[in-house]
Image (cartoon, grey):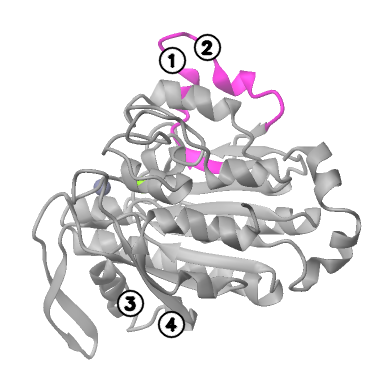
Amino acid sequence: MKKILLTLLFPLAFVQAQQSQDAPLNIILMIGDGTGLSQISAGMYANNNQTVLEEFPVIGLSKTHAVKNLVTDSAASGTAMACGEKTYNGVVGMDAKNKKLTSILELCEEIGYNTGLIVNSSIVHATPASFYANINSRKKYEEIALQFIESEVDYFIGGGKKHFEKRKDNRNLIKEMKTVDVVKSFKKYKKSTHNKIGFFTYDDEPPSLNEGRAPLLGEYLSSTLDKLDKRKEPFFLMVEASQIDWGGHANNIDYITSEFIEFNNTINVALNYAKNNPNTLIIVTADHETGGLAITGGGTSPFEMKASFNTGGHSATMVPVFSYGQSSGLFAGIYENTQIFHKMKKALGIN
Ligand code: MG
Ligand code: ZN
């Protein structure tokens, strides 16, 4: 967050207005990677036929295609949602003509917001990278890490530490992050009272929940919301359940449903925050569907299902957008995924 801008844009009065709807808007954007309607349905059945998404009053549908291909990847769709432009698969934060784009996270920084990224992939993976990087290939992890340390993100939790400290250029980017308290454990993350805190959860990509990934995404969100709440300043947070997609690629229904249930519990943390802070907007969506999943059989006592997959890749079906809280009405209807960026901008009152 840029202090001077904050002072200019939000005079002291906003501190008192924090609990009312007149206070500046907080946004919690929650992305289930590869989470189409079938993944949500499967996760809901596996969760005894319940999902917290049933409490979301506004539902829309997002058209996920990339600029030329009907089937998008997470880079093109991440860029569409983060920056408002369709681009080619594999491209992060740049449009189809290689022009660098400004993300919603960066726009929020400009108006004095605190920002955060919480993911259970590496922090340099395509979805989070769409919010801070501009690069022609999602695979250039070391370059993305360089762009990450130049970004203004205030709080981050994710894997991929090796891209910061075991590099071809021999730089240690963690040491170079002088303004950030980069902690070695979640316990220390919770304890830290620094203005900028980072926690690398794993050296590489985090394992799946079924392989023992811990702590849970909801604990990360809860702790970060506590910190943001204490600051009494508006914020933008992007939270990604990264591995629902990986369960889809593996055509593994248990992988999908376990990761979804963790996501569901994380959404519940956000929802409870928004219930107590009416100046909060939650958007829950996906970048695309993965696996061409269909639920082709099963029973209700207990809820059990038979799953069938059409592909080991992504599919081009529309994905749902659930929204809750202030300005959530903007997200009803059917629209291109790029509109998620434009609707967030409108909700923030940015021209
Ligand atoms: Mg992702
Ligand atoms: Zn994928």
- Say the numbered circle drawn on residue 54: 4
Tell me whether the residue at label 1 lies in contact with that at label 2, contact meaning CB atoms closer than 8 angstroms.
yes
Residue sticking out furthest to the top: 169
Q: Nearer the viewer, mark 1 or mark 4?
A: 4
Q: Amino acid at mark 3?
A: Met
Q: Earlier in the sequence, mark 4 or mark 3?
A: 3
- Say the numbered circle drawn on residue 44: 3
- Say the numbered circle drawn on residue 167: 1
Q: Which residues are magenta?
A: 157-180
Q: Is residue 164 magenta?
A: yes
- Find disc 2 in the rendering and name its residue: 171
Residue 304 in the image, given as x and y percentages of width and height: 20, 80
Q: Is residue 203 magenta?
A: no
Relative side of 36 to 190, left or right:
left
State the image quarter where residue 282 is shown. Answer: bottom right
Q: Dot 3, crowdedness within 10 Å: few (<14), some or many (≥20)? A: many
Q: Amino acid at mark 1?
A: Arg
Q: CA distance from mark 3 to mark 2?
A: 45 Å
Residue 229 in the image, given as x and y percentages of width and height: 74, 59
Q: Nearer the viewer, mark 4 or mark 2?
A: 4
State the image quarter where residue 193 is shown. Answer: top right
Q: Nearer the viewer, mark 4 or mark 3?
A: 4
**Residue 297 in view here:** yes
Question: Residue at (33%, 83%) from the top-left corner?
Answer: 48
Mark 2 CB in 8 Å range of ligand 1?
A: no
Of 63 and 251, the residue lying toward us: 63
Q: CA distance from mark 4 to mark 2?
A: 47 Å
